[in-house]
Image (spheres, rainbow, N blue to C red):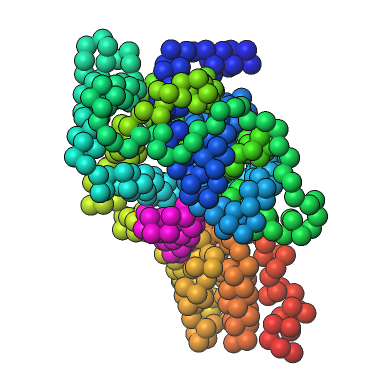
Amino acid sequence: MVNTLKHQWLSNVRGDLLAGVVVALALIPEAIAFSIIAGVDPKVGLYASFCIAVIIAFVGGRPGMISAATGAMALLMVTLVKEHGLEYLMAATLLTGLIQLVAGYLKLGSLMRFVSRSVVTGFVNALAILIFMAQLPELTNVTWHVYALTAAGLGIIYLFPYIPKLGKVLPSPLVCIVGLTVVAFLFDIDVRTVGDMGDLPDTLPIFLWPDVPLNLETLMIILPYAIPLASVGLLESMMTATIVDDLTDTESDRNRECKGQGIANIGSGLLGGMAGCAMIGQSIINIKSGGRGRLSTLFAGVFLMVLILVLDDFLVRIPMAALVAVMIMVSIGTFSWESIRNLKTHPLSSNIVMLVTVVVVVFTHNLALGVFAGVLLAALFFANKIGHYMGVDSALNEADSTRTYTVTGQVFFSSSEKFVAAFDFREVVDKVVIDVSRAHFWDITAVGALDKVVIKFRREGAEVEVIGMNEASATIVDRFGVHDKPEGVDQLIGH
C-alpha cells in the first residue's frame, strides 16, 4: 500500500509538476469557454475545474488523467441553465455525482469491455476533430499576427524537444505559452488574449448549498439532465482512461474512477461549480508533457487557482494563439493516423463501426450518442459474423431408418433461422437424432428454434432424440423449452 502511494505520488515529481503547469495554463481558456457554452459565469467553470482536478487526484482510479469542466458536459447544461438558472445547475451537478457514485458501487465501469477497439478509435478520432474545430473561431476573421503566432507556437512545440539537454527538461507546450506571451507583450502585438474571454475569479470557492426546494418537483426538473450528464461523464472518463492506459502501458481501476468522478462532481456542486469529467485533450497534454502520477493532476488544479488569484496579470496577457497552438498539437496527437492506413487492411465491418462513430459524434457533438451507435453496430456485425459459423450436417442410417443431424457452432437469435432451415422435415424416417455436442444454445430464440424442429419432426411421425447437450445449454433448454413438456407442446400448437 505504502509503495503504491509512493509510486503514484512521488515517482515522477519534476515531470508531474512541470506537466501540471502546462495543463493549468491550458485549462483556463477551456474552462471559460465551456462556461460560456453552458450559459454561466466563467467563475463556475474555473471553480469546477479546480475542485474536480484536486478531488480526483486523491480519489480517481487513473493516475495522470486530468478531469475538469468539459465541453461535452457543458452542451447538456444549456437548456437547464436557460430555463431554471444556476441554482438548479448546481443541484443537477450534485445528483450527477450521486448517480456516478452509485454506478461505481454497482461496478458499471466494467461495462467498458463491451466497447470494441473500433468504437474507441472512432471516439478518439472524433474528439480530435472536435478539438481542432473548437480552435477555428480563434483563427477566422483575425489579423495575420494570429496566424504567425500560431505557426510559431507549433514550431516551438514540435522543434524544441530536439534541442540538446534543454529540450528534454522543459515541456515544449509550456515553452510555447511563455515564449509567445513574452513576444506578444514586448512587441505590443494586438491579438486576442485570455483576459478577453471573461473576468477571472478573485477569491477561492466557498461552500454553497443550492438554493432550490428539496421536493419531488425539483427532482423531476434536474433528473432528466443529471442522467445524461452522468452517462456522458462516465463514458468520456472511461474512454480517456483507456487511451491513457495505452499511452502509459499501465492499467486503471474503472470502477474506482466512476466513484471518483461522482465524488468530484459532488464537491464541485457544493463549491459553486458545474459537472465535469475526464478530459482527453488535457490528459494527453499531461502525458506528453511528462506527467504520470497523481501529483500532476493535483498540481494542475492547485496551480490553476494560483494563476487566477496571484498571477492574473500574467495570465490575462497570454495570447489565445499560444493556446490554440497547444490544442492543435493535442488534436494531431489524439487522432489515430494509423486508423487511416488500416482502412485498407482491417475488416470492412470494423471500418464502418469506426467511421460511423466519428460521423455521429462530429455531427451531433454528442459523445454518448456516437459511442452508442458504434457499440450497436459492432454488436450487430458480431452477431451476424458468429451466426455464419453455425452449421448442420446429416447422415442417414438406412438399416434402421434413422437420420442423424450434427449441429456445430453457436445457436442464438442471429443463427436460429439458419438452424431450422437445415432440417428436412419432409423426409420419411422412423427416427431423428439431433447431436448438439458441438453446439451451444445461448438464448430463448435458440430454445424456441429447437422446440420448433423437434415438434415438426414429431408431427411427421418421427421419433426425436436430442443428445450431447452441454450443461449450460441444458439449463436454459430445461427452463424455457417445451418440446419435452406435454402441456407446453399443447400450448405451443394451440390445443
Can residue 378 be seen by looking at this rendering? no
Q: Nearer the viewer, residue 86 or 374?
A: 86
The rendered magenta stretch, by its main secondary structure, is classed as helix
What is the x, y in percent for residue 240?
Answer: 47, 38
Magenta-span inclusion, residue 372: yes
| Residue 205 lies within the magenta run | no
Of residues 456 and 314, the one drawn nearer to the viewer in this rendering = 314
Would you say 438 lies left or right of 224 here?
A: left
Q: Specify the quadrant of the image occupied by residue 8.
A: top right
- Range of residues picked out in magenta: 358-387
Q: Is residue 361 visible?
A: yes
Point 62% across, 59% down: residue: 83
- Residue 42, placed above or below residue 169: below
Could you tell whether 87 is left or right of 308 in the image? right
Q: Please tell me whether residue 119 is drawn above or below residue 205 in the rendered image.
A: below
Tell me where residue 293 appears, x and y as whole percent.
Answer: 50, 21
Q: Residue at x 54, y 31 (%)?
A: 201
Residue lying at 70% horizontally and 74% vertically, measured from the top left: 482
**Where residue 283 appears, x then y in whole percent?**
44, 32
Looking at the rendered image, the quarter that the C terminus falls into is bottom right
